[in-house]
Image (cartoon, rainbow, N blue to C red):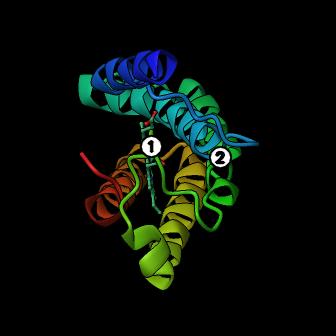
């Protein structure tokens, strides 16, 4: 009787810290969260550069290429029956797969347009397509990610 109580206590403590380990084989939840973190890491500095008004076409292009290279990584880790802690995905990912796919495809198209704009080095196009990518993140998170 003693050991399970200790195990439960530890589990509760970990849950309280928001540090539930993904213990399933292949760690699909962890893998997709790591992939999204890599995406935001590439995406965030672009917004900082544009907001500060110091657009540098070459640096921006490198960031757009990094985002493009990472944009495909999360999706294969949303397999069936992978909605468990520590996931912050909503049930809609699995209940409305067509809507999820639609938002994903809009995001893919938006990152294509952003890369093309970065290659053109046209600041106006870069700002416009950056906003479209940002909107694509937000649109999907609204329905498919818990805050
Ligand atoms: C098609 C849907 C979709 C798009 C597009 C999308 N995300 Fe997400 N994102 C999700 C879902 C679902 C999760 C929750 C994953 C989980 O916890 O299982 C998530 C999680 C995250 C996380 C948290 C990762 C963690 O460690 O918990 C970050 C950061 C993130 N997304 C950033 C972005 C950024 C930045 C963009 C756009 C450049 C973006 N996402 C585009 C669906 C999307």
Q: Of 41 and 34, which appears nearest the observer?
A: 34
Which numbered disc flags the more N-terminal residue, 1 or 2? 2
Q: Position of residue 29 (x, y in %)?
A: 57, 44
Answer with the quarter of the image where residue 22 lies.
top right
Tell me the element at label 2.
Answer: helix
Beta carbon of the mark 2 residue lies under 8 A of ligand 1: no
Q: How many marks?
A: 2
Q: Which mark is residue 133?
A: none
Q: Of 82 and 114, which appears nearest the observer?
A: 82
Residue 93 visible in the displayed image: yes
Compute the Cα span from label 1 to label 2: 11 Å
Circle 2: is it few (<14), some (14-19), or many (20+) Cα within 10 Å?
A: many
Q: Nearer the viewer, mark 1 or mark 2?
A: 1
Residue drawn 57% across and 32% down?
Answer: 38
Residue drawn 47% across and 20% down?
Answer: 7
Q: Position of residue 11 (x, y in %)?
A: 42, 24
Q: Disc 2 marks which residue?
A: 28
Task: Point out the image quarter for the C terminus.
Answer: top left
Please determine whether, in this image, residue 12 is positioned above or below residue 120: above
Residue 55 visible in the displayed image: no
Circle 1: is it few (<14), some (14-19), or many (20+) Cα within 10 Å?
A: some
Q: Position of residue 116 (x, y in %)?
A: 60, 55
Q: Which mark is residue 85?
A: 1
Q: Position of residue 83 (x, y in %)?
A: 49, 57
Q: Left or right: where does residue 6 sit relative to residue 147?
A: right
Q: Left or right: where does residue 24 sit relative to residue 111?
A: right
Residue drawn 35% across and 27% down?
Answer: 15
Q: Left or right: where does residue 24 sit relative to residue 118?
A: right
Q: Left or right: where does residue 76 sit relative to residue 96?
A: right
Residue drawn 49% across and 62% down?
Answer: 107
């Amino acid at each position: 009787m003693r050991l399970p109580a200790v195990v439960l206590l530890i589990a509760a403590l970990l849950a309280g810290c928001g540090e539930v380990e993904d213990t399933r084989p292949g760690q699909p939840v962890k893998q997709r969260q790591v992939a999204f973190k890599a995406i935001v890491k590439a995406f965030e500095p672009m917004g900082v550069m544009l907001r500060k008004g110091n657009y540098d076409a070459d640096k921006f292009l490198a960031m757009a290429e990094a985002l493009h290279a990472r944009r495909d990584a999360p999706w294969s880790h949303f397999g069936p029956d992978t909605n468990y802690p520590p996931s912050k995905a909503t049930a809609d990912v699995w209940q409305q797969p067509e809507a999820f796919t639609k938002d994903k495809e809009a995001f893919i198209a938006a990152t294509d347009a952003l890369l093309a704009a970065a290659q053109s080095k046209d600041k106006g196009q870069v700002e416009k397509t950056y906003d479209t990518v940002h909107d694509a993140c937000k649109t999907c998170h609204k329905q498919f990610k818990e805050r």
